[in-house]
Every structure is written in C-alpha cells, then in structure tokens.
Image: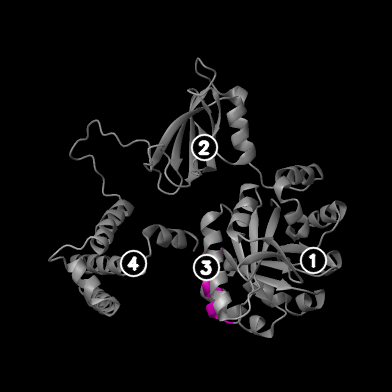
Amino acid sequence: MNKKLVASIFLYEKEAITGFDNLTVVSKDPVALAKMYSDKHADELLVFDLSMGDKEHEEALDIIKAICENVEVPVIGAGNVKRMEDVKKLLYAGCQKAVLNYSKDGNIAITEEVSLKFGKEKIVVSVKDENTYSEFADIIKDYACETIYMGNKFKEAFANAPISVVALLPDVSLDKMIEIMLQKNVSGVAGEMVNKNAKEIDSLKMLLKSNGIPMAALEASISWEEFKKNSDGMVPVIVQDYKTDAVLMMAYMNKEAYEKTLSTGKMTYWSRSRDELWVKGDTSGHYQYVKSLVADCDKDTILAKVSQIGPACHTGSYSCFFNSIMEKEDAKVSNPLKVFEEVFAVIQDRKVNPKEGSYTNYLFDKGIDKILKKLGEEATEIVIAAKNPNPNEIKYEISDFLYHMMVLMAEKGITWEEIIEDLAKR
C-alpha cells in the first residue's frame, strides 16, 4: 500500500490559519492554498472548519465546496460535525470523506448511523489519545475506514491498529516522521511537517521512498528510449477528457516534455512553432492534469487521459476538433450523457431566453412549487406504470420524470456534471 502525505488547511473567518491553537493567517485565499497543495502533489487535503456560529459555518462550507471543485486530490472534511446533517453537508460539498471527532460524545453516538447511511468508506474517526482509541476500537473498525490520530504517543498507541491511521503531527524531525511512516498501520502523515514542506513534496516523497516507504508517484513503465520517434525525434500525443472520453487535442512530446509531464503531473509538450517547452495552461490557466498515459501497439503514439481545466483549444472551444468535414446521417450515436446534456442545454436556454408558448417557460414562470408538484406527479406515474406488465409505459413515464427533474436542476443551478461526479463517488 502506498503511503500518503496529507496537507492540512484550517479555516477560520474565511481565511486559512496555522492551526487549532494558532490564529496566524497562512493565506487569505484558502482555495488558492488548496490548489497549491494539489499542484505540488499532496496526496490528500484535510480541511478543518474552525468557524464559530452558523453564518460563518455556511461560509466555510462554501469554501470547502470551492476547494473540492478546484483540486485534483481527495478532500477530507472535518470540524463542526454535530449530527448526521453535518456529515451530509461535507459530503455534498464534495469531500470524499468526513471526520467524526471522538472528543465529542455526540460524534461517537452517530458513528453507526452515518456509516450505514453514507458508507464506511466515507467515514474517518479522529482521536486525541490512545485510551479513547482502545475504548472504541471495535466501533471504529466496524464503521470507519481510517483514523486520524492527534496525540503524541503514536508508536505505543497504534502498534496493532485494526485500520489504517493518519498521524496529524506537529513540527517533528524528519527522522521521527520516517519512524512513524515505517509502521505498517500508518497510511500517511498530516500536519506541520507536510505543510511546511508543501512546495517540495516530490522531493520529500523521494526521500521517504529511499528509506523504504512506498509512496504514490507518477512512474513510467515505458522509458522514453523505448518509444519510436518521428523524424523530429518526437512522439505525437492524443489527449482525451478522462470523464467524457472526448478527444480534446493533439500535440507532440520530446524527452524533456515527457519527463516533465511525469514529474509535475501536468501535461507538457514541445511547441514546434515556438521551438520551446510548453506546459499546457501556464498562459491560459487551462491546465491538463494527467490521469493516465497509454502507448499504442507500436509505441509511436501516446494516448493521454486528463482532467481538463477550461477549454482545451486556444480558440476557446472545449475541443480542438470542431471543423466538420463530412458526417453520414446515421453517424450520430445516442450517447445517454450527450442526450441528457443536449436536452438540459435547451431547458437552460429557455430559462435565459424565454420562448412564447413554451411549456418549460410555463414551469419556470409558475416557480418552484409548480415544478415540485409536477415532479411529484411524474414520480407517482412511474410507480403506477411499474405495476403494468407492459414495460413501454414505465419507459415513457421515466422520460417525463427526467425532463421535469432537469427543469428543477436548471431552476436550482445544478448541472449534470455535478450529478455525475457525485454518483461516481458512491
């Protein structure tokens, strides 16, 4: 199992501070700080909401949501959890996991409930001392996927931990950090040691690896020398969106671009027109974060699947491939996601550009209560149709329901991409 370096962000009054007992401001822009940690290859982000009061708590949740939308690593949400609803808010904000603080009896009491509701893999428990851990070890094992330990007797307390543990460390020495990371039950470390060295995380990972600690890193199973290059000594790269499989662009790599792509996790090419290295996004901000690199059968072409930030094309188009040459009438395939997006785009357009006589605009004009009434009616129609042995009826009722659901989505400003991302996490 690869071990991880977890960067920590402590949110207080919409800023990132140093820690629980230190209000010194680290960054006035927590989202930018989180993006830096992500870009520097922290394996996860642990975000603590230290807000006081409901208004500040809601503002912190908005910041956590923005962090989740702007980073390429999993986010663990912690702080201000008192009931199941608080866990739900963290997960709905985009956090991959939520933390139950076992210093609070109420958090212990809801462990089984939230675990059964959201899944064991979504629940992390934090403890401050080995006695608490020992007392509730069975509950933690049954209903949580990981533990965060914030005490100072790590080795003694967790030598035989039943599930993996992340150590939230103060500013310890490198030797102490290595000692802790070498323990078999430790899945990673977080805290000052990681934050302080955030800009050198790759170097820190290499140092840990040299001490026998397995670390996650982009490592190529095919060396540059194994590729068949073109006459310019380069390899063409076809780039796909890893979520939609849409072909975004084609570019070229030389050895320097290939190695920099692997070392940074950002797609890097060789610009033949400018005769220089080109990190996609350095000028526009439209970075491409590597998800996978695959060589073809002859090893003379690379297929890159990426997380695309913004449009891929310099024209502002999502993909560089938009100039139609020819298309047969039967070429269009009913891709379910594409159909949803096309219908939803029409609904969104009706909201912005009303059309006389449009049923969609009638619903928008009547407002949320009418939309919800129709959605409820269509849900009931599905139930009734399901009792009919003819499957065609339920097919039509589901289509009606999905249409009204998309009207509701447009009314509430929710996109299919958000829905799909949430489903993919389950």
Dot 3: element = helix
What's under tag 2, amino acid-wise?
Lys
Q: Give me the residue at 69% from left, 50% from top.
A: 2
What's under tag 4, amino acid-wise?
Met
Q: Earlier in the sequence, mark 4 or mark 3?
A: 3
Q: Earlier in the sequence, mark 2 or mark 4?
A: 2
The residues bearing labels 4 and 3 have C-alpha atoms spaced at a distance of 19 Å
In the displayed structure, would residue 64 be above or below residue 179? below
Counting from the top left corner in percent of width and height, residue 328 is at 19, 35
Question: In front: 159, or 359?
Answer: 359
Give the residues drawn in magenta, as a range. Answer: 83-95
What's under tag 3, amino acid-wise?
Asp
Within 10 Å of disc 1 (Cα), the crowding (few <14, some 14-19, many 20+) is few
In the displayed structure, would residue 375 be above or below residue 354? below
Counting from the top left corner in percent of width and height, residue 41 is at 65, 48
Counting from the top left corner in percent of width and height, residue 6 is at 69, 57
Question: In front: 296, or 98?
Answer: 98
For the question of whether residue 119 can be seen, the reply is: no
Q: Are marks 3 and 2 in contact (CB under 8 Å)?
A: no
The residues bearing labels 1 and 4 have C-alpha atoms spaced at a distance of 48 Å
For the question of whether residue 9 can be seen, the reply is: yes
**Circle 4 sits on which residue?**
409
Q: Nearer the viewer, mark 1 or mark 2?
A: 2
Q: Give me the residue at 79% from left, 43% from top.
A: 207
Question: In front: 48, or 418?
Answer: 48
**Circle 2 sits on which residue?**
280
